[in-house]
Amino acid sequence: MRRAMLPLLLGLAVFALPLPAAAADDVPTVYLYVNDLASPHALVTTEARDIQDICFQVDLDTTAEIAVLIVNTTAPLGIDAFAVRTFEVNGIGKTGEDNGVLIVLSTDDRDWRIEVGYGLEGVLTDGFVGRVGREEMLPYVSAGDFYTGIYNATVAIGQKIVDEYEPGPGAHPPPRLIVIDWRTVAIGVAIFIVVSVITKGRVSLWVVGSIFKRGGFGGGRSGGGGASGRF
């Protein structure tokens, strides 16, 4: 009887472990800070890390969150609606500050958009981010150099935020790129205990889940401002 219950417990363990969160309207879940979801990838690992380092420093210095997202297509929503929905679903920017920015590139559609949160609209005006997109990013991504285009745009936006944005008062904890998924830990411990009791300690079982996961954004809102174009 005890042996017969082990496969059942293992099966339950698989279903009990957390699955990746599904985002609304087929927009992806994005994490701090660079998300290259294109196939094939537009960036190599070192390139993504270079851009992420800039985003991290801006977040550390100002609390503003810059997200970079590369996808193959934004269909069926289109680049503008896709950017707004992705921004809102993932809460880019800090709660109450709404100080997020989302840079989206769609490699197959050849579209780009820079979406700006409410709290940064006074600093990152539509005219400014439009110039960044056209002058800093467009010449390079049009030639297939996604790294230089995104890097230049991230630097320009990040520097503007550092120079002109003043975060709200209060404590500002440092960004957490990696967090522990305590739900997975708790499930693993519970299954370990149950199986150990059933087997009277003769079987040591540990359900290994993904207890570490990438950190998410802070809960900000899009302001609807920004700029978009084609390359």
Image (spheres, rainbow, N blue to C red):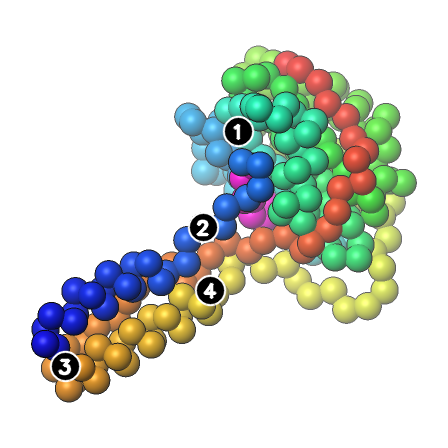
Q: Secondary structure at mark 1?
A: strand
Res 54 seen here: no
Measured Cα–Cα span from mark 1 to mark 3: 48 Å
Q: Which mark is residue 181?
A: 4
Q: Residue at 82% of width from left, 68% of height from top? A: 170
The type of residue carrying mark 3 is Thr
**Comes first in the chain, label 1 or label 3:** 1
Residue found at x 28% / y 81%? 193
> Looking at the image, is mark 4 or mark 1 earlier in the sequence?
1
Cβ atoms at labels 4 and 1 below 8 Å apart: no
Task: Please state which amino acid type lies under the numbered disc 1.
Answer: Val
Q: Residues within 10 Å of mark 1 (few under 14, many from 20)?
A: many
Q: Which residue is mark 2?
A: 20
Front residue of 7 and 216: 7
Q: Which residue is mark 1?
A: 71
Q: Disc 1 or disc 3, which is closer to the eye? A: 3
Q: Which region shows up in magenta?
A: 27-34
Circle 3 sits on which residue? 199
